[in-house]
Structure formats: C-alpha cells, structure tokens
Image (spheres, grey):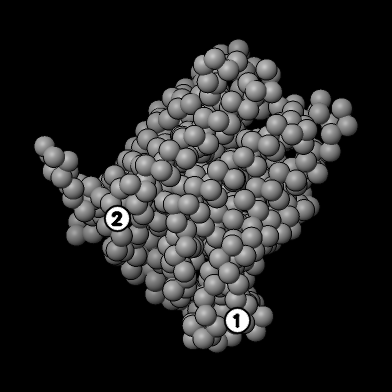
Amino acid sequence: MDALQTIIDAIALGSVYALVAMGIGLVFGVMRLVNFAHGELITFGAYALVLTNHLPLVVGIVVCFATVIGLSLAMEVAYRPLRTSPPTTMLVTTFAVSFLLQAVALLAFGARGQNANVLEKLNTAVSIGDLRVRWVTLVSIAVGAVLLSGTALILRRTDIGLQMRAAAMDFRTAQLLGVRATTVIRFAFVLAGVLAACATVLLVVSRPLVTPGYGFQLVIPALVGVVVGGLDRLTSATLGGFAVGFAASVLGDVLPADGRVFLDTALFLLVIVVLLVRPGGLFTRSRAAWERV
Amino acid sequence: MRRLGSASQLVAPVALLALVGLAGSFTSRSVQFQFRFALVMATIVIALYVFVRNSGVVSFGHVSFVAVGAFAAGLTTVPEALKLSLSPDLFPIIASAEVGNAMSLGLAAAVGGLFAFLVGVALMRLSGLAAGIATFAVLVITNNVLRNWEAIGPGARTLSLVPETTSFMQGTVGVIAVAILAFLYQRSRWGRVLRASSEDPYAAQGSGVNIYRQRLVAFTLSGALAGFAGGLFVHLLGSITTQQVYLDLAFLTLAMLVIGGVGSLWGAVVGALLVSGVNSLLLSAEDGIGLGFVDLDVPTGTRLVTLGAVMALIMLFRPTGITGGREIRLPGLR
C-alpha cells in the first residue's frame, strides 16, 4: 500500500513537470530555443494569484492566465533577434532574461515569500481504501492528462498544428511551403503559456509560498528532464519532464531521513548518468552522434 | 615581427589589469575592497574563458571549481580549534591541515584542477545543450554536497576568520599570472587544435584530433585556474558560505564574460572589470551616494535588474559582446 501511495504522488508531480516540460519542448520544436525563462512565467503567474487573493477565485485565475500568456507573448517578441543565433547564444540569452525577470520580481515583491491561498479545499485528503490522497493530487493527474492529450490533438488535427510539426521538422522548407514563421512561433508561445498557467495554479495549491525564485527552482528539473528525455521530439521531451518529476518524488520518499538533504545530488547524478549513456535522450530511438542537440 | 604582434595582444589586457591594481591602491579603504573584488572576478572570468572560448561549449558549472578552491584554501588556513567548533565531524586530515598563504592558493588550484579533471573525464563526451545542462548539474551537486556534508567543510555555516591576505599585490600578480597562462594556452598547439575542433568538429576529427582529450585538457586547466581564483576569493572576503559560490556568482561571471565578449582574452578582462565597476557603483547607489551635484539613491534590487537588463540587451543585439570578440592590437605593433 505504501508503494502505491508513493507511486500516486509521483505521478501527480510528474504530471505537473510534464506540463512545464511540454511548454519548453513546444517552443524548442519551432525555434530551436531552450527557454530558461519559462520558469518566470510560473513565478509571475503565481504573483498574479497572490495579488488577486482577496478577489473571487475566477478573477484570480483569469488574471493569472492573462499574465502568463501576455508574458509569454512578450518573450516571443523579445526573442525575435535570436532566430538565427547559434544555440549557445540562445541559451545564455534566455538565462539572462530569466535572471532579469527574477530581479524584477525581487524589486517589486521583495525577497520574503508571499502567500497565495487559492483552492485550499483541494489540500484536504480523500480516502480510497487504505490510501489517503489529497484532492490536488487527483486534480493534477486529471488536468495533466487532459492538457497533454489536448495539445497532442491540436498538433495532430488542426492546420496550425500541422504547420508547427512541419516547422519543427525543417523550418526552412516549411517556410518555403507557405508556413508563416511568426504565426507558428507565436502560437507555440501561447500554448506554452497556457500549459504554464495551468501548472502554476496546480503548484500554488500545494506550495502557496511564492518567492522570486519560485519558478526557477521548478524549471531547472523540468529543463533537465526535457534534455534527458530528448529534445528532438515533443513526446520524448514531455516524457523526460514526467520522468524527472516522478524520480524526484520517489527519491524523496525512498531516501532515508538523514539522506534526504542529498536529494538534489541523487537526482542530478542520475541525470548525468543518463546523459552519458544516452546523450541523444532517454526516450529517443537513435543514439545521437557527437554534435547533435 | 609576427611573434611580437601576437604578444601585443597580451600586453593590453595585462596593462589594463596592472593599471586597475595600481589605481586601486591609491583609493580610500572602502573603495579598495571594490577594486580587489574586481581583480578576483577577472581571475574567475579568465578561468571560465579558457574553457568556453577554446572549446565552444558553454559551462554553467565553473563556479563549482571556484567553490572547492575557496573551501580548500579557507579550511587549510583557519586554526584547527575553530574548524572543529564549526563542524565536529570534520575528517581529521582536514581538521589538522594548516598551511601558509601561498601554499593554500596552490592547494586551491590543485583541488580545482583535480575536481575538474574527474568531472571532465565523465562529461567531456557531451557537447552543446547536453553539456550545458550537465555542467549545471555539477554545480547543483557540488553546492548540495558542500552544504550538507559536514565531514568535508562547515556545511551550511559560515567559514570565518580566514586570513584576508588577498592584497593588491597578490590580487594583481595572481590575475596577471592567470591571464598569461590563458594566453599561452590559446597560442599553444593544444589551444589551436581545440579551437579548430569547435569550429568544425568533423574536419578536426578527420585531421586526427581527439576532441575528447583536448577538451579534457582545457577543462582541467580552466578548473585549476578557477580553483586558484576561489583561493584568492576566500582570502579576499575573510569568510565564506556555500551560497556565495553558487547561482548568483555563476550568473555574474557568465554575464561578465558574455558582456565583454567570449571571443577574446581582452573581452574577458574588459567585461569582468566593467561589470564589476557598474556592480560596485550600483551597490553603493542602493545605500545612497552623493555624486557631487546629485544624490544617487535607488531602491534595493536595482543592481540586479540593471545587470540582467544589460546582459539580456547585449546578448540580443550584440551577441559577440562589447569588444566584438576581437583581441586588441596596439597601433604600431602589427
């Protein structure tokens, strides 16, 4: 029974990480850009929830979505000069943007955490047999499943989805065939924003204390998951995010109490091992050669 | 004449560093610290430059080597009783070790180099994004272990009472020595071979270059220099915690390198000194300073916002940095 409990919690955390990872993967697909600043979407979304704490919940969630999607679109505009840059330049630039937004949050809201009490009812537990599962766990799994399959549907069944997949495969050729670069890239950022906003609401329920580093702490493991899973395909990137969330949650439960402080070490060692064994990604078919990714 | 011409590329950065060292020693006590801080930052940035420039692989993890160097130099120059009062579980060999100032800097370089070698053996097969993420993982692991394993250091506590021996003399000589080593390496056969491999890996491999081995050499050298810089750093501050050698420093040093320009030693030096200067100015502006005609007093946090904005803008609109990634050539010495 204990094992089952561990697995359910791990699936819930994995789902949230998968949402974040899929957002990163969508943007990477069309732009070959890894967005370190993806975490700040979550940070600012969470602050939006803090600021609307006294207003009705619906207003808070609407403001949160508007903030996150707006910020995501602003990033799309800011990253335009990068479209032809080498990967290293892109990586360092988004790192700088992430740092800048964290500094802005620090300036605006201070270093001390602020509470966003939304949907507290979801923190109560429900008993299923011997298991005690919090509502938020179940909601996370459900929302994760719906959004991930929804995004997959958009990519498979709509025109814009088809264009995005074409752009991800070969941007230049897609452009020659009439795909508008800005349209697909902007759409990817909107989708990434929607996924990040949903992840924000889910996260804030179980971790209501929002600090300037809120999203950054989360995006690092998710980003690592994306690379570990394999950036080349959205599915493998998403699975990678899920795997890292799952592993973090399981390690947290399995490690002995005095070893728990070394959770990060264990997790990141695991990541290094995976990168060494399969540099192209855990869930990709081919072992990538030297200079891929 | 050609030899002289290439050496002239070393003259400018060294002269600038010497000038900063000299100018700083004539300023008031509180400003002196800022100057010495800038020199130590320049040392770290040059160490980072050695690897990033020649291999073309970005590393988020070099602050790990600064961290181990800093703690190695710090722990070997603090009295045994103090060490044991901070963390009773310390390994006896670390607790009893006590060496002189110069020796502690050498030890810092050795520890940094050894650690970089061990990390490099595993990671230098990776490149691009995977390498960036993996070096980031190294930084997280190093911080996590240093912060929690009290047998090798003070853990989350502050290691204080480290002798503050990083004088202008030591700082200036140290940073110039590191700059010369970086220059010699980049002019050497190994440095050229590695740069060739970053420009075209297939052509380089086709010419018989073992990229893995060349990267490992650069990574180890760069780690040793970073460790040495860590030694200077801890002897500058006099006390240190694990959080001082973590994400913020990693960002700051990477920003310095990128703002100056990754492509040249001159860029690394200019970036480090310029950003340190702006950083110090903003830091004192946050406390409020009078500039003669206006009083500058800005809210706390302005410093980080400014740094972040400058770095983001430079990356977006001038990705080769303010020096354009070129070495400076003195007129007359072509």
SS of the residue under disc 1: helix
* Depth order, front residue of B53/B130: B53
Figure check: A1 above or below A217: below
Q: Residue placed at 59% from the left, 65% from the top?
A: B104
Question: With B327 as the anchor, is B215 left or right in this view?
Answer: right
Q: Position of residue A166 (x, y in %)?
A: 62, 25
Q: Which chain does the numbered disc 2 sit on?
A: B
Provide the residue designation for mark 2: B30
* Depth order, front residue of B34/A277: B34
SS of the residue under disc 2: helix
Res B152 → quadrant: bottom right
Q: Position of residue B34 (x, y in %)?
A: 36, 50
Question: With B11 as the anchor, is B304 left or right in this view?
Answer: left
- Residue A146 in view of the camera: no
Q: Residue placed at 62% from the left, 82% from the top?
A: B96
Q: Which chain does the numbered disc 1 sit on?
A: B
Q: Position of residue A133 (x, y in %)?
A: 49, 74
User: Could you tell me which quadrant the C terminus of chain A lies in?
Assistant: top right
Figure check: B327 above or below B117: above
Provide the residue designation for mark 1: B95
State the count of labels. Answer: 2
Question: With A232 as the anchor, is B11 left or right in this view?
Answer: left
Q: Position of residue B162 (x, y in %)?
A: 47, 70
User: Could you tell me which quadrant the N terminus of chain A lies in?
Assistant: bottom right
